Image (cartoon, rainbow, N blue to C red):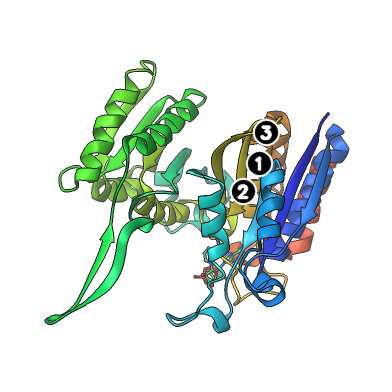
Amino acid sequence: MGTYAIAILAGDGIGPEVIEQAVRVLQAVADRYGHIFTLTEALVGVAAIDAEGDAISDATMELCQRSDAILFGAVGGSPRFEGPDSKIQPERALFRLRKDLALYANLRPIRPFKALLNASTIKAEILQGTDLLVVRELTGGIYYGKPSEIRETPQGCDAIDTLIYSEAEIERIVRTSFELARDRRKKVTSVDKANVLSSSRLWRRVADRVATNYPEIALEHLLVDSCAMHLIRRPTSFDVIVTENMFGDILTDEASMLAGSMGMLPSASLGVRRTDHGLFGLYEPIHGSAPDIAGQEKANPIAAILSAALMLRYSFNLKQEADAIEAAVERIVEAGYRTEDLREAGKEVVGTKEMGRLIAETIRG
Ligand code: NAD
């Protein structure tokens, strides 16, 4: 039994709809196992810009610093803040959280449920047995490197972005991936572009060095283009994949298709701060605010619910409780319940709230 402080940042569009169901499931866990989850809600994204003048306020940042973990929905989706001339972007909330809270490791587990193998565009026999974890570096690389600008020249414009990594940045993310592989099938695939990029050559050198501390774990190197192909050709051959920020961004969206719907995939972003319970982290579904289906009871809350399970596992060390959420989701999907995004002949389509209720009731037993 324990008391855990969680900041709830539901955000925009379907964010609040799916987070409401994740909270419902957390309440079921609290009831069954006797924990206390202290939940404090705050605004992010468009909602925060309208009410507080920024995508995330200093007060909300302080709330996050004080919490043991953050449960995040999604931000964006308003035409008022889209386009190159918009002064404030709702997504700034996420960038600030990642950077200021040093959330350097983004984890995306992908394990398609048996009952949903046919929901993917990839053949079921290729998918069967897939169970991989992508570990993406989140606070460095080309998305943060300076200079990054468009420059006027007498011959027209030039543009520059900078891909820079320090040895220390590479070492901590590679080390994280090896630690995670220890509890899994003991294989790490390090993805780079070492045949072209200097940053990748340093990456590979550091990965080889880290590997010497983990003799029980097999390390393979793959070029990012080759990895993109193998992900859909032989997904079962991967255990833990570790890669830099931009490669990870692209590969994780590709890998998400293995699970059938964006509405199924959770993520964890872990930092360096330790709380009384474990590692501080931010947990969110990988999808966005989906304005096309917001307010229609069509959003699949499973990605948000599975994100709450990751929070219990990685930030609170509540492994049994995390397993209970994942088992409940699997049971409900196996029983034939589907949200609109997974509509299938012969299966019962339910709304966002009903899906959350079914999963919460399964946990209560
Ligand atoms: P999206 O992920 O919101 O939606 C893509 C498609 O998937 C849509 O057709 C949507 O209806 C569907 N979808 C997404 N989540 C679903 C769910 N849980 N259940 C059922 N269907 C689901 O991506 P987008 O449409 O490119 O972006 C919409 C807005 O979200 C944009 O403003 C974008 O910037 C923002 N965004 C935010 C985040 C985030 O907050 N982390 C991530 C991606 C996009």
| Picture disc at residue 283 | 2
Label 3, ligand 1: CB separation under 8 Å: no
Q: Position of residue 350 (x, y in %)?
A: 73, 64
Q: What crowding class fits label 2: few (fewer than 14 Cα within 10 Å), some (14-19), or many (20 or more)?
A: many
Q: Earlier in the sequence, mark 2 or mark 1?
A: 2
Which residue matches tag 3? 275
User: Which type of secondary structure does the marked residue at label 1 adopt?
Assistant: helix
Q: What crowding class fits label 3: few (fewer than 14 Cα within 10 Å), some (14-19), or many (20 or more)?
A: some
User: Which type of secondary structure does the marked residue at label 3 adopt?
Assistant: loop
Q: Nearer the viewer, residue 225 or 98?
A: 98
Q: Are marks 2 and 1 in contact (CB under 8 Å)?
A: yes
On the rendered image, what quadrant is the N terminus found in? top right
On the rendered image, what quadrant is the C terminus found in? top right
What is the distance, in whole Å, between disc 2 and disc 3 at their CAs? 16 Å
Q: Residue placed at 54% from the left, 79% from the top?
A: 81
Q: Is residue 260 visible?
A: yes
Q: Position of residue 40 (x, y in %)?
A: 79, 53
Which residue matches tag 1? 311
